[in-house]
Amino acid sequence: MVKRFLLLTAPVLVLGACGGSFEFQIGGQSAEEAAIELIDSDLAKAVGLGPLTTTCDEVVEPEVGSEFTCRSITGEGDTIEWAVLIDREDHIDVQSQNVVLLPTLEDIENNAVEALYGDNPLEVSIDCGDRSRVLDQDNTMICDAATAAEPTVIHDATVTITDTETGAFDVLVSDEPRP
């Protein structure tokens, strides 16, 4: 069963909640170096997935309005994508593109159960884990679904963020339990 659901929170909470700004000097530190420093320190802590190894595309002519991409590899091998903008002189803004932070996961879990089952008397839970999640290239993550009657029988709940601007997502719960 697939249900389309619009997450009723600001879209920035789905993917862009983990971002930040950082001052840098063009004469001493490149925009890429500043982005790596910010991502590997403050933003790594905010994401909460452990140390990150980050690389950034080269900015040939750094000027206000220039955009570039950085990628971080987590300890588990997931790739986080970051959009970086030189938004004013000696300043960058960095926003995650594929990370769902823990507080938002809890909202997704609750809204997915409501969208799928509504007033159904089955006590169903969807659990996407206890830490931030990196979405795959299809903006998808697999969560656990179970009923109160059979809490050890786990089904895949596939959550796909269908619109990163609005925060809309689809959820599909497999009819078959995991082996």
Image (spheres, rainbow, N blue to C red):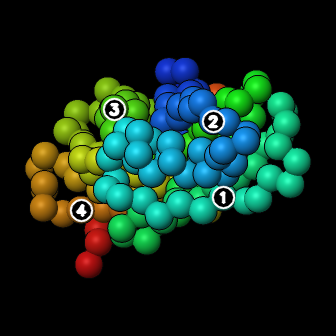
- Mark 1 vs mark 4: which is more N-terminal? 1
Disc 4 is placed on an element classified as loop
Q: Is residue 138 left or right of residue 179?
A: right
User: Which residue lies under the disc numbered 4?
Assistant: 154
* Residue wearing tag 2: 24
Crowd tier of the residue under label 1, counting other residues whose Cα lies within 10 Å: few below 14, some 14–19, many 20 or above: some
**CB atoms of marks 4 and 3 within 8 Å:** no
Q: Along the horizontal axis of the image, is 30 left or right of 106?
A: right
Nearest-to-viewer mark from 3 and 1: 1
Which residue corresponds to mark 1? 56
Residue 101: percent from left, percent from top:
40, 39
Task: Name the residue at 80% across, 53% down.
Answer: 59
- Amino acid carrying mark 1 in the image: Cys
Q: Which mark is residue 103?
A: 3
Q: Secondary structure at mark 3?
A: helix
Given the image, on which type of amino acid does mark 3 rest? Pro
